[in-house]
Amino acid sequence: MKSKIWQLTSTLLGSFLLLVLAGGCSGGSEKEINAGVFKVGLLSPGPVNGQGWTQIAYEALLKIEKELGAQISYVEVEQSPALFERAFRDYASQGYQMVLGHGFEFQDAALTVAKDFPNTYFFISSSKIREGNVIGVDSDSSEAFYLMGVVAALMGKAAGLVGGVEIPPITNAFIGFTNGVRSIDPDFPISTTYLGSWTDAAAAKEAAFSMIAEGADFIIPDADAAGSGVYQALNETGPGYWSFGIYNDYTSQAPNNMIGNYFNDYGQGLVNLARMVKDGNFDIQTNVEFGLKDEDVIWVKFVEGRVPVDVQESVETARQGIIDSKINTLSPIR
Amino acid sequence: MEPLAIVSFLAAVLAATWRLATPFIFTSLGEVFSERAGVLNIGLEGVMLIGAFTAFAITFFTGSPVLGLAAAITSGLACGLLFAFLTVSLSANQIVVGAALNLVGLGLTSFLYRSIFSGRMETAREYVSFSPLEIPFLSSIRFFGDILFKQNLMVYATPIVVLLGSFILYRTAFGLSVRSTGEHPRTVDSAGLRVSMIRYASVLIGCGLAAVGGAYLTVAHTNQFNEGITSGRGFIALAVVVIGRWSPWGAFAVSLLFGFFYALQLRLQAVSGITIPYQFFQAMPYLLTLVVFVAMRRRAAPPGALGVPYKS
Amino acid sequence: METVEPEIAQKPPSRRSDLKKISFSPRYLFTLGRKMAPPVAALAAALLVGAILLYAAGYSPWYAYGVMWEGAFGSRNNLAETLLKATPLILIGSGLAVAFRSGIWNIGAEGQLYAGAVAATLAGIFFTGLPAMILVPLVLLAGMLSGAIWGGLAGFLKVRFGASEIVTTIMLNFIAIIATSYLVTGPMIEEVGKFPQTAQIADAARLPRILFPTRLHIGFLLAMGVALASYLLLFKSSRGYALRTVGISPDAARYAGINVGAGLMISMAISGGAAGLAGATEVAGLTFRLYQEISPGYGFDGIAVALLANNNPIGVIFTGILFGALRSGSEVMQMNAQVPSVLVSVIQGVVLLSAAALGVFRITVAESRKE
């Protein structure tokens, strides 16, 4: 008896839903395209207020809003590659002139959608692609990490790197660091740990502790929100152990341990691109790659009084070498 | 490795073991009570997250991790009350309510975190937490000093809490009634005790301790909250209870074992030359649970009335 | 003073009673209304809680829900996206309905989905030369088999070693997810780019689309088919009758000469196979390659979907669409009203809690542990 009732319940519920669906279909119309407004959308791979990677895209968006008066919108499509295409399509069909997919994983979906929307620019972070209106934008962290490597090799005994997940943006940064270290001291020890997580700060902290126990005195995270765990470990261990703030100023988290900060004002870089899109004079024919040469986008700043002058000079030499393309920060490690 | 290096390697791994085991210890101890009384709570992850967030938020606004911890316990008890009301008073399905708690825990903490703290991220990261407390003299003992006497208060608390839990479960009338309720609720009922009250109490203990386990992550082990910071620890605690065979000291030992895997994993990666994928270590607790089931055959029997609602 | 009495299984209904149920007598409608009220009330309660949260956080609940509705049903494309999300939920929910009715608590659909996705991807990458006519079914079959094996493993551990399937399936979830992470960062990583993802599957392995220009693919129809088949199995076949008897009382089933162990293994394999199929349709219909996080938790939502439909596969179609609409609408809500989409987890959780409070899930867990 009961199951039959349920059967009917379902049938009725179903008809109700179908009615609703039908109503929804007929009622819905494609949204009008507001041509006068400059609209920029963001597909974020995680919570926009997470630290590190996802946050820089969000801040970029806010900067575009502020400086160019754009109408902005973002969507967190975390963990769900299946949703990317829809989000791109939704933005494009609402007349967004510029959509940023913040991560290599958005590339497939952008390529698919872009064909149908030739008037929208699809920017893909940490991608090197260029196909029509799909443009890879990479901010090459390996260059900044190279400079950190130089500092570590000149000032420290051993280095530890704590990565979130083993993906190219992280591994490339670490290759840059290693090349920087090797340019000074080929035998300088470097150990690397991947957490397999972007949020597990406790694991990052323990990874840092274990590196300290192993003798490392330069420990640098590249693990988004989890990375703070490294700073906390250093802060607890005390002076004499060093780190760099990654993407932002994290000096306050370990005031005695921060030797400098690597700033990545992706926002400024994107504002530069967005301005071209807005003014209709986007004429870059290749993919976009920010590096130390874009001084308003990527730079490393030392904390006052922590780095001796001779080290600073070596860093400056390396920086010039990178900008002049004399140094390849991504050259393969033997 | 040199002998001396091995000693320092071990000391560091073992110190980390205890710290990484602490959230498992609190959470699984609580779940031992709950399951011993016949209530299976698969919503531990959600309760841990709620505890973690509450502790973080209150500590952030008051500046006192003690208040934060107290608030976390309160939030855990509230979850427990809800869970017990639905599963005990209304005989709702324990799996459903547990699954719902996980959903609500993740959704609610993330939503609140973004609503309250977005825009003040920089300041939100700085607040006082339970910092390591070096015990005079003892902490300078070689090897053992590093492992045992340079931890924070919540880590020190674990054996005491487990001892207390074990005492209550095996040496008090309440403990006896908890254990009987999980095996033969009808007997308990006919002895004039109220099954529902005993289950309420056990669920409250379970959720309260799960919240403590979560709070540990945000006000003791680190001083920050991230969405999903528990990273599946609530589910590992479920495994701990099974492998620890529903006993407080068993749960304590297994928690330490899992903490050890965790610490070893982070440490071995850093030692150059060893190339075991980190995923192997991540999967270890889960694989081990299956192995234990196979190895123990039916001796690993859970409480007889686990998961079965009772109506008097 | 006794444990809750399990409901008594009905015999497979005869043809005649089939016809009878079509009549809409007033009494029938009244009972129907009474039965429908709890799930509807649960949804209302959840939306209310969501509204309070929205209001407290400074959003307009009315506006946010309006945008959400638009996002779920407001256009052909949005409707298609809702159905796309409903597809894995319906597949998983139908399978779980079979498992839950048989009294086995499969919490492992998420892991079974991953197992299916991995196998489907392998098939789609490996057998490139085959025509679509053969390759598409092959990919789906690979996913289904792989999921069935992953689910059957938990069934085997229960039957052979008495291991609680609740615990083992949770463990198997993590193992499958971690193994996938290993595969896509290690052995199965793409050749070019070296991002943690596999190469794309062959063009011939991709599911045909059915509602141009949207992405809705044939997997949705497949899901409807699976729901129907599960329904027929459960309620119109003697095998289903045996399974339900096992679910209600293993002792009675044993007494009636039913092989309880085999029944449990079969229902685990069926639910695992359905979840594996969901993994296969995600890969072959949408993503075309395997990523670390191929599922946003469909396996867990599927549990709710099955239970909310009272483990009736036909009901699952509708609860699946409901949950699909919630997910899909919440994305648009975030895009256009900037409301964090995590709100939808709260709404789903509260739907379950209120439904539990209103007594929707009164099926007792069969005590098959101590066989």
Image: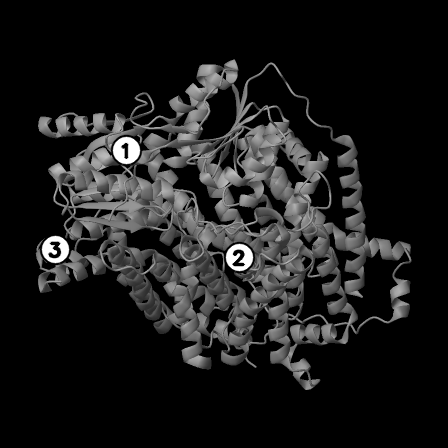
Q: Report if the CB atoms under discs 2 and 1 are less than 8 Å apart.
A: no
For mark 1, what is the residue?
A: A143
Query: Of circles 3 and 1, which is in front?
Result: 1
Dot 3 falls on which chain? B
In the rendered image, which quarter is residue C21 located in? Answer: bottom right
How many C-alpha atoms fall within 10 Å of the one at disc 1: few (<14), some, or many (≥20)?
many
Dot 1 falls on which chain? A
In the rendered image, which quarter is residue C264 located in? Answer: bottom right
Can residue B92 be seen here? The reply is no
For mark 2, what is the residue?
A: B98
Answer left or right for B82 relative to C14: left
Q: Residue at x 30, y 62 (%)?
A: B261
Front in this rendered view, residue C189 or C275: C189
Nearest to N terminus: mark 3 or mark 2 = 2
x and y, in percent, of residue C213 in the image: 70, 38
Q: Is residue A33 above or below residue C144?
A: above
For mark 3, what is the residue?
A: B139
Q: Is residue A200 above or below residue C264?
A: above
Amino acid type for the residue under numbered disc 2: Gly
Q: Residue at x 70, y 40 (%)?
A: C79
Mark 1: which secondary structure? helix
Can residue A283 be seen here? The reply is yes
Q: Are marks 3 and 1 on the same chain?
A: no
- Point out the image quarter for the N terminus of chain B: bottom left
Amino acid type for the residue under numbered disc 1: Glu
Label 3, label 2: how many angstroms apart (C-alpha)?
A: 42 Å
x and y, in percent, of residue A333 in the image: 25, 46
Q: Which mark is residue B17?
A: none
Mark 2: which secondary structure? helix
